[in-house]
Amino acid sequence: GAGVSQSPRYKVAKRGQDVALRCDPISGHVSLFWYQQALGQGPEFLTYFQNEAQLDKSGLPSDRFFAERPEGSVSTLKIQRTQQEDSAVYLCASSLALGAYYEQYFGPGTRLTVT
Amino acid sequence: DAKTTQPTSMDCAEGRAANLPCNHSTISGNEYVYWYRQIHSQGPQYIIHGLKNNETNEMASLIITEDRKSSTLILPHATLRDTAVYYCIVSANTDKLIFGTGTRLQVFP
């Protein structure tokens, strides 16, 4: 079956532009997560959803970052007025449910470069 | 969530066992130990997790000390495809994984 897919795989934006990153989770997975990974660092949590409800957005670095999952499946991470420090790989993951026994399945990521 | 400490890098010969240590001295009683790995240019991949008993699956074994303050991930017969960054994570659930910087394992021929 298909895994988690993300699009685009690569995005170059000029400073100040808005970008939208898409995540298609595994079908039937209730939980969806976004992480940001800077070069040479481990992924850092941004936010997560259970169905369409955003339960935790404590990791979003500023109010320029916004995530949504309106129908409980596909999710979009939007970054407004991009800055150079936003350059990173943005990873999406999904899991069947929340809880200790449910592993997260990760997509390949979107590499964002802000010039 | 408790913090973990891992060596920055390790080497292992192909075909030999790779033993990756992790210290988590402040782990709480309800926190699990999870291992994920990230191969270059890919998203992280789940390997195994455990609470207090040793665990084994088709990928690896997880040995947790009796006091739960440390653990070791064992890849019994490392291959070149096991070259990756390995992350040890402790968490009471999986709503927020805190990755750290992990151990970069290099498997050489």
Image: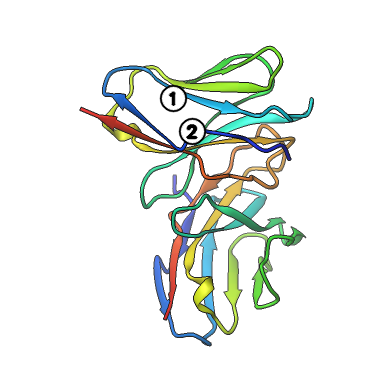
From the top left corner, tell me how far across and down residue B108 is, in percent.
24, 30
Q: What element carries label 1?
A: loop
Q: What residue type is labelled 2?
A: Pro
User: Which residue extends farthest left?
Assistant: B109
Foreground tag (2 vs 1):
2
Disc 2 target residue:
B7
From the top left corner, tell me how far across and down residue B38 is, in percent.
44, 43
Give the image quarter of residue A82: bottom right
* CA distance separating discs 2 and 1: 21 Å
Give the image quarter of residue B90: top right
Say if B17 sits above or below A12 in the image: above
Say if A5 sits above or below B34 in the image: below
Comparing A94 with A80, the one in front is A80
Q: Which residue is drawn at 66% across and 73% down?
A: A66
Q: In which quarter of the image is the C terminus of chain B?
A: top left
Display colour scheme: rainbow
What chain does mark 2 sit on? B
Q: Is mark 2 on a helix, strand or loop?
A: loop
What chain does mark 1 sit on? B
From the top left corner, tell me how far across and down residue B98 is, in percent.
63, 45
Disc 1 target residue:
B59
